[in-house]
Image (cartoon, coloured by chain):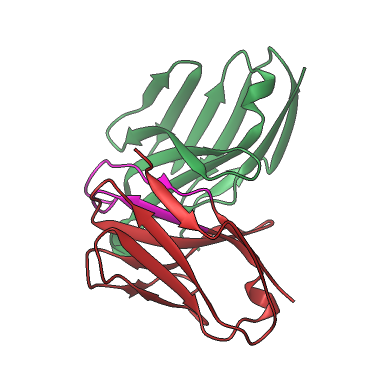
Chain colours: A red, B green
Amino acid sequence: NAGVTQTPKFRVLKTGQSMTLLCAQDMNHEYMYWYRQDPGMGLRLIHYSVGEGTTAKGEVPDGYNVSRLKKQNFLLGLESAAPSQTSVYFCASSSTGFFYMNTEAFFGQGTRLTVV
Amino acid sequence: SQQGEEDPQALSIQEGENATMNCSYKTSINNLQWYRQNSGRGLVHLILIRSNEREKHSGRLRVTLDTSKKSSSLLITASRAADTASYFCATAFYNQGGKLIFGQGTELSVKP
């Protein structure tokens, strides 16, 4: 059981380039999330999805787009990368939302992105 | 910010000692969770405590929740070098829908 898998694990981009990060989960989870982690900032939510075909903005959505065409996949796109987007990106999934249900999040291993 | 705030930001102890980390939040919650992150890895769920619970145990972990003070603590007893990691509290707030919001974390170093 792979859980949550992120690809790629590392990437270096030049300013202005575009790329897509892929997150795949095999737990049939409805909810999926993209976070970024920066030193001293903890994890900040970029975008999330509450089911196939849905997406919503998190705390720091600017400069990113997402798509959830298949239930098991959640894609994070950077259309025109900027140095401020240098970060470690984590994907997570959960079976339900967190407020009403006592569920946990499952995380991928992260993608370390550097924009030069 | 409605996210959890953790204290201390960094903690260094000797193997065998206990480690206590604290988390405070600002609005009503239904549950609060703690996660561990080893260097360079993803987060791993440790324990969840419901708002109607005051204390919960899992192995060497003890979590308390004080909803009147809007705070939680994570105690790791008899720490080991392998406990060296960052620890995060996380919760969902009613007006934030189904999203999980994380604190900034406590970096724990356990010296052998």
**Could you tell me residue B45's position as x and y percent?**
43, 37
Closest to the observer, B99 or A73: A73
**Residue shown at 40%/69% (left/top)?**
A75
Is residue A105 shown in magenta? yes
**Could you tell me residue B87's position as x and y percent?**
57, 38
Residue extent of the magenta highlight: A90-109
Q: In the rendered image, which quarter contains the C terminus of chain A?
A: bottom right
Q: In the rendered image, which quarter contains the N terminus of chain A?
A: top left
> Is A106 left or right of A97, judged from the image as shown?
right
Residue B26, visible in the rendered structure: no
Residue A74, visible in the rendered structure: yes
**Could you tell me residue A17's position as x and y percent?**
61, 84
The correct choice, above or below, for B21 with respect to A17 in the image is above
The correct choice, above or below, for A86 with respect to B20 in the image is below
Closest to the observer, A105 or B90: A105
Is residue B49 shown in magenta? no
